Image (tube, rainbow, N blue to C red):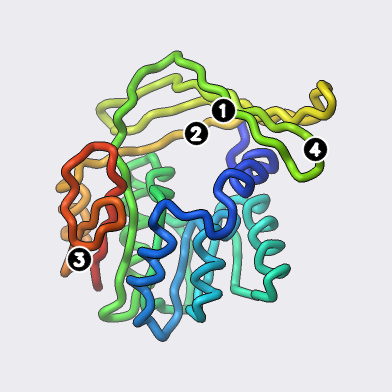
Amino acid sequence: MFGYYSSLSAEVYDIDKHVGHSFGDVEFYGNRLESINGNILEPGVGTGRILIPLLEKGLKVDGFDVSDDMLNICRYNCEKRGLNPKLFVEHMESFSLKEEYEAIIVPTGTFLLLHKRADSLQALRNFYNHLSNGGKLIIDIFLQTDFMTGNVSTRTWDTQDDKVITLESKMVAVDHINQYTTSHNRYEKWDNGRLIETELERFSLRWYGVEEFRMILELIGYKDISLSADYNYGQYPDDSTQIITFEASK
């Protein structure tokens, strides 16, 4: 039985991508949102890596995630900093709220976790419907460059309570027609050489062409679409390894 962002995965995420850790995106999103006075929504908020710095800048940000384990860590990270944002369990493709938002943000390629085309399209429509008039969507994607199945990679993290978590990851399938890859991840927690917890995860990631994604946004109704490469605002991407940020308004 495969999990998805369960306890070990969430713990690793919080260690590896701790609050405030930036790929350039924390500063970029802070700058792009600094003129927003109303509410902001971050779907796929994780453990608060970007949410918390935005809250500390005085921005009003709500967040949701599909994972209770991620949100539990996010709540703890907020509470120890004296922050109390609205956090809840939801799915990008199906959430329905009374609130409208001046901005919706999906940093760091999180949107690509919606590997089914119908779900990804519905999520973009959902974002559009939850934006106020003139509100903006800021969303990151990245291109897939590795399609080699069967290779195994291993990473290791030390926990605060002197245990060790290992991650063994193997790409097992590439669907070129529907544009997504699937990997199997095995998380294990060790205490003095003794295995005390293990977790299996099926992890799929979608990819888009740059102009393909722009066209999808246009068809849904977004306008004033701009692109940025590696968090350099307005710089069109010129390398397959770059993070690509789309900004569009309703």
Q: Residue at x 30, y 76 (%)?
A: 135
Name the residue tied to disc 1. 185
Q: Quadrant of residue 172?
A: top left
Image x and y of residue 198, in percent: 72, 28
Check disc 4 and report the residue beneath it.
162
Closer to us: mark 4 or mark 2? 4
Q: Closer to the camera: disc 1 or disc 3?
A: 1
Comparing 89 with 226, the one in front is 226
Which residue position holds label 2? 203
Looking at the rendered structure, the kind of residue marked 1 is Asn
Q: Earlier in the sequence, mark 4 or mark 3?
A: 4
Looking at the image, do the residues carrying marks 1 and 2 touch, with CB atoms under 8 Å apart?
yes
Mark 4, other Cα within 10 Å: few <14 / some 14–19 / many ≥20:
few
The residue at 30%/38% (across/down) is 207
Residue 221 disc label: 3
Does the residue at mark 4 contact the one at mark 2 (Cβ under 8 Å)? Answer: no
